[in-house]
């Protein structure tokens, strides 16, 4: 399954249809639209400078518990107009300290 998923032709076709860029960094960007080509170039430039960071949303940058604290606080902040940014920061600090 991994061999098929990571096949260059599959990566190209799948990501063109999805509107994203391939996980592989050796895919020829010519088949992608201007936005896709720019995203591929931006990722390459960021990687060259050491600026590619792990994903918070995919649990690559932290544990599931840390992600849960962020999701809870962000959801509360987005849905409660009385919650200030300072309140949200305090909740983040408290939630993370409690782990």
Image: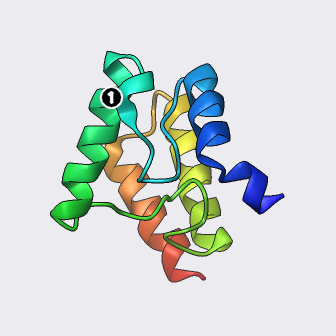
Reply above or below: 21 against 48: above
Q: Nearer the viewer, residue 1 or 56?
A: 1
- Residue furthest top in the image: 33
Q: Which residue is mark 1?
A: 37
The residue at 73%/50% (across/down) is 5
- Residue drawn at the location 56% of the way across and 24% of the way down: 16
Front residue of 41 and 74: 41
Up the image or down, 55 lies above or below 30; here it is: below
Is 99 drawn above or below residue 83 in the view shown?
A: below
Q: Residue 31, position in %: x, y? A: 44, 23
Residue furthest left as drawn:
49
- In the rendered structure, the answer to whether residue 30 lies left or right of residue 55 reads left
| Secondary element type, mark 1 | helix
Q: Could you say where residue 81 lies in the image, as x and y percent from the top left?
A: 47, 27
Asked which quadrant contains residue 12, the reply is top right
| Viewer-nearest residue: 18 or 12 | 12
């Amino acid at each position: 399954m991994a061999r098929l998923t990571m096949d260059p032709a599959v990566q190209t076709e799948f990501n063109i249809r999805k509107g994203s860029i391939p996980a592989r960094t050796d895919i020829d960007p010519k088949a992608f639209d201007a936005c896709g080509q720019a995203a591929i170039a931006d990722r390459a430039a960021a990687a060259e400078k050491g600026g590619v960071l792990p994903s918070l949303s995919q649990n690559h940058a932290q544990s599931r518990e840390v992600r849960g604290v962020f999701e809870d606080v962000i959801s509360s902040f987005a849905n409660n107009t009385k919650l200030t940014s300072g309140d949200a920061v305090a909740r983040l600090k408290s939630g993370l300290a409690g782990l």
